[in-house]
Image (cartoon, coloured by chain):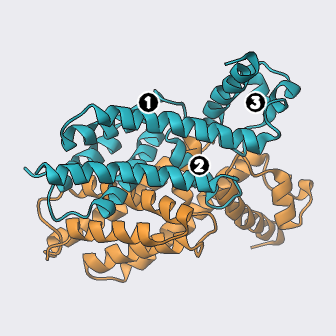
Chain colours: A orange, B cyan
Amino acid sequence: MNKGERTKRFIIEQSSSLFNKQGYQTTSITDIMNATKLKKGGIYNHFENKETLARNSFTYICNVLMEIYNETISNKQSASEKYNAVFNVFIALCENEIVEGGCPLMNAAIEADDSKLYFEDKVMDNFNNLINLIKSIIEIGKKQNEIKKDLDPEHMAIFILSSLEGSLALSRLFKDKIYLQLVDKQIKEILFLK
Amino acid sequence: MNKGERTKRFIIEQSSSLFNKQGYQTTSITDIMNATKLKKGGIYNHFENKETLARNSFTYICNVLMEIYNETISNKQSASEKYNAVFNVFIALCENEIVEGGCPLMNAAIEADDSKLYFEDKVMDNFNNLINLIKSIIEIGKKQNEIKKDLDPEHMAIFILSSLEGSLALSRLFKDKIYLQLVDKQIKEILFLK
């Protein structure tokens, strides 16, 4: 990686955290200048405008997140362990461990639904990836006789993701993991054979 | 209501929709001037600053929403009808029928979790009201032998609210009510006796 590429990467890393915390529209180039200690020209040298930087930052943080999801589930054998691994990513997001500001997908979804974010397509793609990842865990669990046979993997994946995202927002608002933990308990009761 | 009170009310009504769509930080006094056709002085005459207006607008839209919830469930007898009434409010929020921009509570929660909104307390109060409202439906359903006796009303209310809020966000992002409908179907299977 040459110096220009390193600077570009550095800007994306710093911006992705800011955008996730404050929102893509609220975060200004001045905020990014302050975080990177770069001048405006130093930023626009790598990104033609704020929208391009925002899209690049969202793609970057989603790639980081999806890598964590994929890595953490790939070295587990049982569907139960794989599901727990997904749940632990939500706990990490609650505690600002992966990135500050909560789930990048949910934050962008809430911002995208009635404003032009210029990357609604990317938000949808990433949600579909996450739905498919949870769906694959359910399919494995059904094959391994861990998960109830009559459950529809896709419908259940959408239900699980919805309830985890909703309870993450509650846990972050109330600064209390109990919302995530209660939802996790319910999901396990629905999903797994005793 | 005198002229001053009518103007104050008009500003709050117009602003609450803008704030809900665009976010409390993103929406500027200029946006509110454009929406109300009032001059800056005409707005600051009624609200000392944007934060006061934002807090008033959030309180207003939450009162509207909670009145709708309370009214729509109060004239139903069965827990099943009451639950359906709550679900229909989510469908209405999905379709911008009550207010544009999705669920005011969820939008504010996502914005509040890592920025100073000056009314996190109000967001929490309103979420607690909504959890208690769903909890009361479950308690009625248990008494009326509609809902499974072994369910914990508060835990189940948190689970239902989390999954409805999460799926509302997905339905608004993908512009497809199927996410809400799938979650509704799952909730009914968990909740109600056959």
Badge 3 is on which residue? Answer: B31
**Do the numbered discs 3 and 1 sit on residues whose CB atoms are within 8 Å?**
no
To which chain does the residue with label 3 belong?
B
Q: Nearer the viewer, residue A102 or A66?
A: A102
Closer mark to the observer between disc 2 and disc 3: 2
Residue B175 image offset from top left, x and y in percent: 43, 35
Label 1 marks which chain's residue? B
Task: Tell me the quarter of the image containing the N terminus of chain A.
Answer: bottom right
Question: In front: B39, or B6?
Answer: B6
Q: Quadrant of residue B153?
A: bottom left
Is residue A69 left or right of A107 when viewed as pictured? left
Distance Cα–Cα, label 2 vs label 3: 18 Å
Letter of the chain that mark 2 sits on in the rendering:
B
Residue matched to label 2: B108
CA gap, disc 3 and disc 1: 23 Å
Give the mark, 2 or 3, whose residue is nearer the N terminus: 3
Tell me the crowding category of disc 3: few under 14, some 14 to 19, or many 20 or more residues within 10 angstroms, Cα based.
Answer: some
